[in-house]
Image (cartoon, coloured by chain):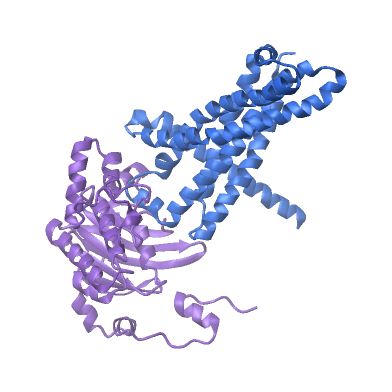
Amino acid sequence: MTPTAPSSNSGPPDPDIAISVRNLRVNYGDREILHGINFNVRTGETMVILGGSGSGKSTLLRALAGLERPVGGEIWIRGRNFITMSERERDKLRMKMGMSFQSGALFGSMTVGENVALPLQENTNLDPSTIEIMVRLKLDQVGLSGFENYIPAQLSGGMKKRAAIARALAMDPEILFFDEPSAGLDPIIAAGIDELILKLKNTFQISMLVVTHELASAFLIADRMILIDKGNIAINGTPAELRASANARVRQFLDRVPEPEVDDEIDYLQMLTGETPPPRR
Amino acid sequence: MFMEAIGESTVSGLAYLGNLAGLTFGSARAILIDPFRGRKLRLSRAIHQAMTIGVEAIPIVSLISFFVGTILALQGAYQLRKLGAMQLIAAAVAIIVTRELGPLMTAIIVIGRSGSAFAAEIGTMKVNEELDALETMALDPVHFLVAPKFLAMAFMMPCLTIWADFVGVCGGGSFGVLFAGFTWGRYFQATLQSLVLRDIITGLIKSVLFGFVITAVGCQEGLSAKLSPEEVGRATTSAVVKSIFLVIAVDLIFTALFYFTAPQ
């Protein structure tokens, strides 16, 4: 068992475990996307979730953020069962979690400053002048000082990601989720986002879960890595353990070996989903 | 097979009405109860919505109501002059505008301007993951997005309807003054004599209900849009068609209710 594999007991995990996922199963309609995922993220640790398109890695992140309802298993966040808790308790816990979406998901009708201020205005009783100072501070942390009054449409892709990270940081979260933080960015801008994630990790000791398929980014920022393949964990280990792994799927992913050509469309579907297709009529 | 299809349509129709009711009650709770439990309602958003729904609609509501009032007078005169009762034009226009066409035409305009905009706005936010972002910030999309629209609509629909009633009467008056021998003073006097408070109040009650229907349908269509730009277009069209149908259905029910409960 790896040091961060979840305990098989039910009940809360060790206090130094920020996130514990146990036998998590998530469906889209009738189709099972995640087939029983298990892993732990320690406090202050950066866990990178790798996987190809359609592997279920974004679904896993959405389930952890409470955006997908699992059909089975448990999610423990900061020692509390995230699935069985009441909506009010879940909202309280969410205030200690931040999420940066792949598209940024900034509110297009608000300025960057208003976007960052929103969680503070809605979830705290801070006066407007304090919120204004905090917004400037958060934007400064992500390198966007002076952009308070810009609307998202006026920002470049990298700046939008930074603004989204500033908004995710607004409530001083203990856990941060990143969905494809460097997707769609040129290598220089992507490297800037990696640097920002490293800075947040070293400065604030936030537990981070990063979903990506960018290998260079993943190896740079990860303390531990998971490779999701067809809704299962193919490997859970440190970057060095992944590099040394002889697992065929891990090797294929890290060495960028393409899938074999599949002529039959049902075989192709099976290859993508890992499911046995229904018999032909 | 046919009966099965009818059964399925009925169940999905009832489920849709259930969703609209859920959205309406969720918003009512956000407006009436949550502020006392420490969850603020963003009044600034409601005021912004009220400006868009109400104030910005005044020119088009005025124009259409004026035309409708004039058309009513023309159609009324076509029959009344055969009876030699042209002096009844003012009463006919006043009653039809305040009880029926003022609220209905206002609702149709608001559906086109605001109901469709609600569906497009919320649908686009869904496609851009903005609704997910709200949830991760512990913000309920109904509380944050839908409730201010209900509040704005509850205030602005009666205001717009009163204005539409007045302009509609003026539209009828323009015909009365130009072609039926009225003066403006006599036309308004005849209008006021023919109206009872109940006519105006029933129209205003209907306008509030229409506002709730338009908001609920527009927001529901946006919230249930699927994740592609084409689906946002589909949600917008669907919001307009369903709102028009439901507004007319609600109109029929309440007009019948007012008729059968009216003092003889």
Residue found at x 82% / y 27%: B78
Q: Position of residue B99 (x, y in %)?
A: 67, 24
Does residue A7 appear in the picture of this structure?
A: no
Furthest-right residue in view?
B82
Relative to B94, does residue B108 appear above or below in the rendering?
A: below
Quarter that holds the C terminus of chain A: bottom right
Q: Position of residue A267 (x, y in %)?
A: 51, 82
On screen, residue A52 versus residue B108, left or right, reads: left
> Colour in which chain A is shown?
purple
Q: Nearer the viewer, residue B62 or B92?
A: B62
Q: Quadrant of residue A129?
A: top left
> Colour in which chain B is shown?
blue
Q: Nearer the viewer, residue A211 or B242?
A: B242
Relative to A259, does residue A80 appear above or below in the rendering?
A: above
Residue found at x 24% / y 52%: A147
Relative to A239, does residue A246 appear above or below in the rendering?
A: below
Q: Quadrant of residue B29?
A: top left
Q: Position of residue A279 (x, y in %)?
A: 59, 78
Does residue A174 appear in the picture of this structure?
A: yes
Furthest-left residue in view?
A203
Residue found at x 50% / y 81%: A268
Quarter that holds the N terminus of chain A: bottom left
Relative to B215, does residue B65 appear above or below in the rendering?
A: above
Q: Position of residue B123 (x, y in %)?
A: 48, 52
On screen, residue A228 versus residue B230, left or right, reads: left
On screen, residue A47 versus residue B165, left or right, reads: left
Q: Nearer the viewer, residue B263 or B171?
A: B171
Number of numbered labels in the structure image: 0
Residue found at x 68% / y 24%: B174
